Each structure stands twice: as structure tokens, then as C-alpha cells.
């Protein structure tokens, strides 16, 4: 077992459980062992893996860990549903990590081309905005974004001419303290991000995977 998973700091073990589950998910999904055709199946399969890992990070009698899916959080402007909320308790207190997930597959479950890559790109940024809101509202200590897609042109584009590249998710993109307003899908957008992010993709099989934390 990796040393970090056996850390004496329970909050570290809790955070690394997310990364360990993601590492397993990436390889299984990339190899085709996990059939992922949309965001819902991604959330279901990832959460199942994480659920199996949580008992392994409990090393003391006073430690607890559980997760909630699609939990409503009041961020001041209304209720938002976080994809996954990981909650832990130890002698050091309570620990909460919010996780948002995004998935883009070229073909939908129906077999039709999905399209709307611009909305997907914008939504990756929207998830980062939500994670920052959860933390600012005191509903989570940390926020993690998990993203997968099967289009290499989103990861390693030959050019970035379209307006959707205002929401640049390509490999090695670095952002910090930005305000994005480029309309997508005919809708006005206002996304403020205060934290810094480093977009780093990892390929398994025919899919690309990314874990982001500000």
C-alpha cells in the first residue's frame, strides 16, 4: 500500500483515497473493463471503486469515512448538487472533500455523435467555479475535479481558433485568478476562478483523464 495511504494524518489519507480510486478507474475505463458512455456511468463506476477503498484508510477506532452522491449544497445563490461529497471524521475533527466529475464521449449511448464539445469545455471550468464556491461557503475543505474524454484534439489541439478555446482545457494549460465571459451555446457566461490550476492529462487506452485541484 502506498506510504501516503498509511499517513498518520487522516485528512491526507482521505484525499489520497480519491486519487487512488481515480488511478484504478482510469486504467479500468481505459482498458474497456468499465463501460463508460456518459457522465452518469462515470460517476457510478468511480464511486463504487472509492467505496471499496474507504475501509482500507481507516486505521484507528475513532476514524470514519463515508460518501454522498448528488448532495445539495447551499452556495448563497441557490442549491447546487455536488457529484460526490467525501466526509471523514477523526480525532482532528471533520474533513469534507467535494468532487465534481465531467465526461465527454464522442458517441452517445444511442450510437449517435454527441457534439457540443464547447459546452463540455465550458462545463469543466464551471465545475471548478462550483468547487471554489463550496469551499468559500464552508461546505468543503477541498475540491477535486475529475475529467475524462476521448477526443485528443481537446487535449493536444493543432490550433485554437474557435471561441470555445477561451475555456482552454488542453494539456499543460495553466490558469490563475481569471474571469471568463465568452458566451457558449448562446448563453451569457460569468466564471470567476481565484485559485491556480495546472491542466495535466493522462492517456489510458483511447481515453484521456485528468485530476484537478486548485
Image (cartoon, rainbow, N blue to C red):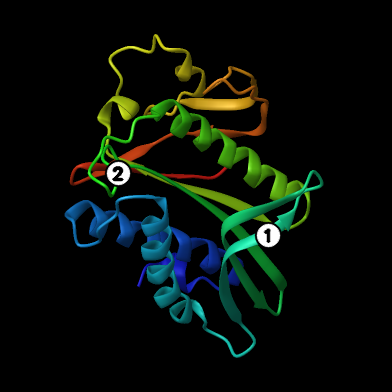
* Residue 201 x/y as whole percent: 35, 38
Query: What residue is rendered at 28% in x and 15% in y?
Result: 158
* Residue 60 x/y as whole percent: 57, 86
User: Is disc 2 surrounded by few (<14), some (14 to 19) or many (20+) residues within 10 Å?
Assistant: few
* Residue 144 x/y as whole percent: 54, 50
Q: Is residue 2 left or right of residue 178?
A: left
Depth check, front residue: 13 or 137: 137
Q: Is residue 178 left or right of residue 136?
A: left
Q: Is residue 192 left or right of residue 21?
A: right
Q: Is residue 40 above or below residue 8?
A: above
Where is mark 2, residue-wise?
Answer: 108
Where is mark 1, residue-wise?
Answer: 72
Q: Secondary structure at mark 1?
A: strand
CA gap between label 2 and label 1 equals 27 Å
Q: State the image quarter where residue 94 is shown.
A: bottom right
Q: Does residue 176 show up?
A: yes
Mark 2 vs mark 1, foreground winner is 2
Query: What residue is rendered at 66% in x and 78% in y?
Result: 90
Q: Secondary structure at mark 2?
A: loop
Mark 2 vs 1: CB contact within 8 A: no
Query: What residue is rendered at 64% in x and 87% in y?
Result: 62
Q: Is residue 3 above or below residue 132?
A: below
Depth check, front residue: 28 or 184: 184
Query: What residue is rendered at 27% in x and 35% in y?
Result: 113
Amino acid at each position: 500500500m502506498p506510504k501516503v495511504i498509511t499517513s498518520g494524518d487522516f485528512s491526507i489519507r482521505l484525499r489520497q483515497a480519491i486519487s487512488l480510486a481515480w488511478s484504478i478507474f482510469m486504467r479500468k475505463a481505459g482498458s474497456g473493463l468499465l463501460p463508460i458512455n456518459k457522465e452518469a456511468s462515470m460517476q457510478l463506476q468511480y464511486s463504487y471503486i472509492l467505496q471499496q477503498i474507504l475501509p482500507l484508510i481507516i486505521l484507528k477506532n475513532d476514524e470514519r469515512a463515508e460518501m454522498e452522491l448528488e448532495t445539495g449544497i447551499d452556495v448563497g445563490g441557490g442549491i447546487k448538487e455536488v457529484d460526490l461529497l467525501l466526509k471523514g471524521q477523526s480525532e482532528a475533527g471533520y474533513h469534507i472533500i467535494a468532487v465534481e466529475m465531467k465526461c465527454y464521449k464522442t458517441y452517445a449511448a444511442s450510437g449517435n455523435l454527441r457534439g457540443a464539445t464547447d459546452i463540455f469545455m465550458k462545463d469543466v471550468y464551471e465545475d471548478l467555479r462550483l468547487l471554489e464556491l463550496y469551499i468559500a461557503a464552508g461546505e468543503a475543505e477541498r475540491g477535486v475535479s475529475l475529467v475524462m474524454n476521448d477526443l485528443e484534439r481537446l487535449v493536444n489541439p493543432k490550433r485554437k481558433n474557435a471561441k470555445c478555446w477561451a475555456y482552454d482545457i488542453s494539456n499543460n494549460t495553466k490558469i490563475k485568478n481569471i474571469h471568463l465571459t465568452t458566451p457558449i451555446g448562446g448563453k451569457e457566461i460569468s466564471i470567476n476562478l481565484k485559485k491556480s490550476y495546472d491542466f495535466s492529462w493522462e492517456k489510458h487506452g483511447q481515453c484521456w483523464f485528468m485530476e484537478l485541484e486548485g
